[in-house]
């Protein structure tokens, strides 16, 4: 316990200094919170303008782009390769060896996402960037119109 006046004044001065420092720290924190709230409001506004105000969903319709495709019959490997080109990984084989690999392992189409196996009856489509991918006949019918 503090008993003399000088010690009491020093202690009071120390407490006032601590109070001023704490008040300044809280004022700084309040200003930082206000700054962050403004940034958050700006982000929310920019996001709504970019993605739309309805939960981020918007509707899109495919652009009318004509894509070429060929149907894989299991008997038209030469035509498929003429269309897609021979992938570098297959150049280690003779044509006869490559035909045997496709017969045993299936037709691999090297897409932008990696290799996919094409099933008999699938179409091999050339995309807008020159990439190739297999597409099931029912999906092709639902999303494309033939334009010959």
Image (spheres, grey):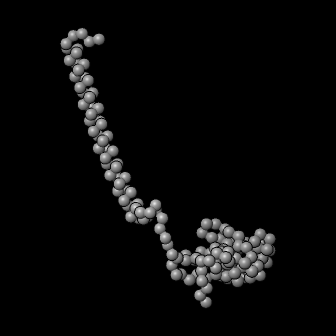
Vertical placement of residue 125 versus 147, above or below: above
Q: Is residue 97 left or right of residue 91?
A: right
Q: Residue at x 59, y 87 (%)?
A: 147
Q: Residue at x 61, y 89 (%)?
A: 148
Which quadrant of the rendered structure holds the N terminus? top left
Looking at the image, the residue that sits furthest to the front is 54
Query: Residue 127 location in percent, x, y?
Result: 58, 76
Looking at the image, the residue that sits furthest to the bottom is 148
Judging depth in this view, the residue of 38 and 83 nearest the camera is: 38
Query: Residue 137 location in percent, x, y?
Result: 68, 77
Question: In which quadrant of the rendered view does residue 25 lie?
Answer: top left
Query: Residue 52 location in percent, x, y?
Result: 42, 65
Q: Is residue 136 left or right of residue 61?
A: right
Question: In which quadrant of the rendered view does residue 89 lie?
Answer: bottom right
Query: Residue 9 location in percent, x, y?
Result: 20, 17
Q: Residue at x 27, y 31 (%)?
A: 21
Say how many tags the image has: 0
Judging depth in this view, the residue of 93 and 125 nearest the camera is: 125
Question: In which quadrant of the rendered view does residue 74 lie?
Answer: bottom right
Q: Residue at x 60, y 69 (%)?
A: 112
Q: Is residue 86 visible?
A: no
Judging depth in this view, the residue of 125 and 39 nearest the camera is: 39
Q: Is residue 114 visible?
A: yes
């Amino acid at each position: 316990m503090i008993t003399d006046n000088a010690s009491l004044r020093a202690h009071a001065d120390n407490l006032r200094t601590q109070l001023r420092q704490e008040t300044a720290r809280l004022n700084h924190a309040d200003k930082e919170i206000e700054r962050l709230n403004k940034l958050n409001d700006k982000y929310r506004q920019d996001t709504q303008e970019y993605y739309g105000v309805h939960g981020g969903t918007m509707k899109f319709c495919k652009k009318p782009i004509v894509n070429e495709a060929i149907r894989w019959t299991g008997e038209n490997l030469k035509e498929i390769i003429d269309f897609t080109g021979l992938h570098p990984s297959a150049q280690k084989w003779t044509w006869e060896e490559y035909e045997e690999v496709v017969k045993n392992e299936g037709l691999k189409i090297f897409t932008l996402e990696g290799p996919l196996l094409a099933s008999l009856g699938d179409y091999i489509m050339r995309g807008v960037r020159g990439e190739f991918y297999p597409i099931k006949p029912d999906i092709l019918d639902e999303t494309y119109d033939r334009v010959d």
